[in-house]
Each structure stands twice: as C-alpha cells, then as structure tokens.
Image: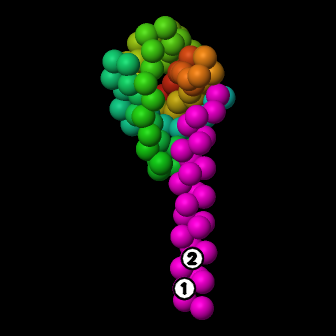
C-alpha cells in the first residue's frame, strides 16, 4: 500500500514538473511578478511569487512600464508583468513585456 501511494505521488510530481516545462515551449501569454530584470534577461515568478523562471528577451521585444515604452532594465522587482511569446521558426521568443507597478 505504501509503495502504491509513493508511486502515485511520484507520477503526480512528474506530470506537474513536466507540464510547467512544456508551458514554456508554447506561444501565448503568462503573467506574474518581476524578480529581476537585466539586459536581455527577465527573471519572473508566477502571480503568487512562486515558480521562478527566466526568459531571454531579444533587443527587438517591445517593453513597457505602466503603459509607456521603457527599457527592460527599468522594470522594478515586485511589479506585475505580462509576457507575450510567439513561435518564430522552431523557437518560441518573447515579443512583448508589459509591467505595471500599481
């Protein structure tokens, strides 16, 4: 009985982690909070401040802070952020980053 329960937990964990990895490979949008922003790189978490991950942000991505054009490096830690990605060729790339401090 203990082995069966352990196996079920292991399978559930596998699906949870693999689902998150595949989500990063799909075009679309997701929202969260800025953890750190630097030239060409955005580290963010989900809306609850968990599941931290990093995006490579190309120089031609549109970045805005409170509705105004800004640089990626101007994003403040803790700001709400919405990242838009698109499939270009065989890669999924960031095309837009929208941050709000309110």
Residue at figure coordinates x 36%, y 32% from the top left: 36
Residue 8 vertical placement versus 80 (above, below): below
Q: Is residue 26 magenta?
A: yes
Q: Of residues 82 and 51, which is closer to you in this image?
A: 51
Residue 102 at least partly seen: no
The magenta span reads 1-27
Residue 101 located left or right of residue 92: left
Find numbered disc 1 in the image and state the secondary structure of the residue it sits on.
helix
* Relative depth, front residue between 87 and 85: 87
Q: Circle 2: is it few (<14), some (14-19), or many (20+) Cα within 10 Å?
A: few
Q: Which mark is residue 31?
A: none
Residue assigned mark 2: 7
Residue 77 percent location from the top left of the image = 38, 33
Mark 1 and mark 2 residues within 8 Å of each other at the beta carbon = yes
Q: Gap between marks 1 and 2, in whole Å? A: 6 Å
Q: Please tell me which residue is depicted at 60% across the width and 91% down the height of the picture.
A: 1
Identify which residue is drawn at 43% across, 24% down: 56
Q: Position of residue 58 (x, y in %)?
A: 45, 15
Which residue does the numbered mark 1 point to in the structure image?
3
Query: Can residue 3 be seen from the camera position used here?
Result: yes
* Residue at disc 2, secondary structure: helix
For the stretch drawn in magenta, the main secondary structure is helix
As drawn, 68 above or below 40: above
Residue furthest to the right in view is 28
């Amino acid at each position: 009985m203990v082995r069966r329960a352990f196996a079920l937990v292991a399978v559930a964990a596998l699906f949870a982690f693999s689902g998150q990895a595949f989500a990063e490979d799909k075009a679309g949008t997701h929202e969260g909070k800025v953890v750190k922003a630097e030239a060409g790189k955005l580290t963010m978490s989900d809306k609850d401040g968990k599941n931290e991950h990093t995006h490579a942000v190309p120089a031609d991505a549109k970045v805005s802070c409170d509705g105004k054009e800004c640089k990626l490096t101007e994003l403040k830690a803790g700001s709400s952020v919405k990242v838009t990605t698109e499939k270009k060729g065989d890669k999924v790339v960031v095309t837009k980053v929208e941050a709000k401090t309110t």
